Amino acid sequence: MGASTLYGPHTLNAYIQEFKKLAAALIGGGSVEPGPQPPDLLDKQISLLTPVVLDATPLGVNFGDVKDDIANSTFKRGNTVSVTFWSACPRNDLMTEGTFALVELLQDQKTWMPVFDDDDFCLKFKWSRPAKLSPQSYATIDWRIPESVVTGVYRIRHFGASKSLFGSIRHFTGTSSAFVVE
């Protein structure tokens, strides 16, 4: 029995053993055999969350549309920029190979370049429903502008996936208005 450990009561000792091998190989310039592939246990996981039945938006609104746009057009380093999008439950697609939120910088007056995503501490993605059983939801993205950013024109993008009543998943994106960081 391992309680909460994946490989039982000796998990820590096994990790220490393997990390010692890796450290010795790094120091000595050697290599380490890859060893066996760990089992894929995704289908064995249990979830206590109720499944997503469907996502919806108000009439005339699309997923990814801006609900509350950026309040100002100019910001300084240290300020927080906030935008809210009509969204869908993030459990429809965990975006493990992507991102829910992105800050982009306009370069050469024509190309948007990604500079921060939801891996960065300065960017926060908050999902919520207006009511517990409502199929409608929104995502608020807050960007606390780091002191190290270059001045320029920025925008915030949101990525998500909505679920229809019949169970199909459709991906969507949303984009805020552009704003200036001085």
Image: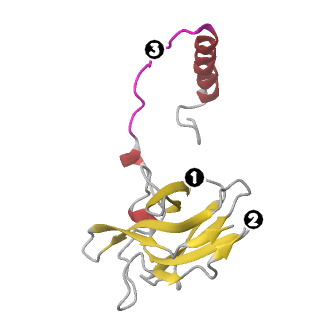
Q: Quadrant of the N terminus?
A: top right
For marks 2 and 1, the one nearer the N-term is 2
Q: What whole-number distance in Å separates the C-alpha atoms at marks 1 and 3? A: 30 Å
Kindly state the secondary structure of the residue where label 2 is placed: loop
Query: Is 4 above or below relative to 155?
Result: above
Q: Amino acid at mark 3?
A: Glu
Q: Can residue 45 be spotted in the picture?
A: yes
The residue shown at (43%, 53%) is 98
For marks 1 and 3, the one nearer the N-term is 3
Kindly state the secondary structure of the residue where label 3 is placed: loop
Looking at this view, name the residue that lies furthest to the front: 108
Q: Amino acid at mark 1?
A: Asp
Query: Is 27 above or below relative to 136?
Result: above
Does the residue at mark 1 contact the one at mark 3 (Cβ under 8 Å)? no
Magenta stretch: includes residue 33: yes
Q: Nearer the viewer, mark 1 or mark 3?
A: 1
Residue placed under numbered mark 3 in the picture: 33
Q: Quadrant of the C terminus?
A: bottom right
Residue numbers of the magenta segment: 28-40
- Position of 5 compared to 97: left or right? right
Residue placed under numbered mark 2 in the picture: 78
Magenta stretch: includes residue 133: no
Q: Amino acid at mark 2?
A: Gly
Which quadrant would residue 74 be assigned to in this image?
bottom right
Query: Is 51 above or below relative to 1?
Result: below
Query: Is 21 above or below relative to 132?
Result: above
